[in-house]
Image (cartoon, rainbow, N blue to C red):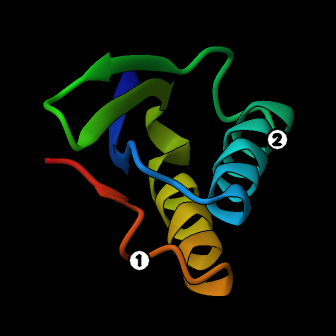
Amino acid sequence: MEKAIKLKVRKELDGRQQLNIIKLKGSLISKGYTEIIHILDQDDEFHINSFETRSESTNEVQEFITAFIDKENLADTISFYK
């Protein structure tokens, strides 16, 4: 069964933040966690990025994203959306 993961991403980003968000999305695809990431507007400040992944990979994907956010200091830029 597929599990949806949603990320809340700030719209106003500096160059470094933009590059790191692109790297994160590319890594999710290249590691085979997903094939496509959907982007929807939430409001004037945020986009919601969502993708499906295999249920058995959900914890691994969430840990990967959390580690990436910590490593790149993106806590105020991207977060999990419930």
Classify residue 57 by image quadrant. Answer: top right
* Callout 2 amino acid: Lys
Mark 1 to mark 2 CA distance (whole Å)? 22 Å
Badge 1 local density, few (<14 within 10 Å), some, or many (20+)? few
Compared to residue 61, the image places residue 22 above or below, namely above
| Relative image position of residue 11 (x, y in whole percent) | 39, 42
| Closer to the camera in the image, 53 or 82 | 82
* Callout 1 amino acid: Ala
Circle 1 or circle 2, nearest the eye: 1
Question: Which secondary structure, mark 2?
Answer: loop
Compared to residue 80, the image places residue 46 above or below, namely above
Residue appearing at x 18%, y 34% in the figure: 44
Compared to residue 34, the image places residue 44 above or below, namely below
- Would residue 69 be found to the left or right of residue 49 on screen? right
Disc number for residue 31: 2
Q: In this figure, which residue is indicated by the disc labeled 1?
A: 75
Compared to residue 43, the image places residue 79 above or below, namely below
| Relative image position of residue 34 (x, y in whole percent) | 64, 25
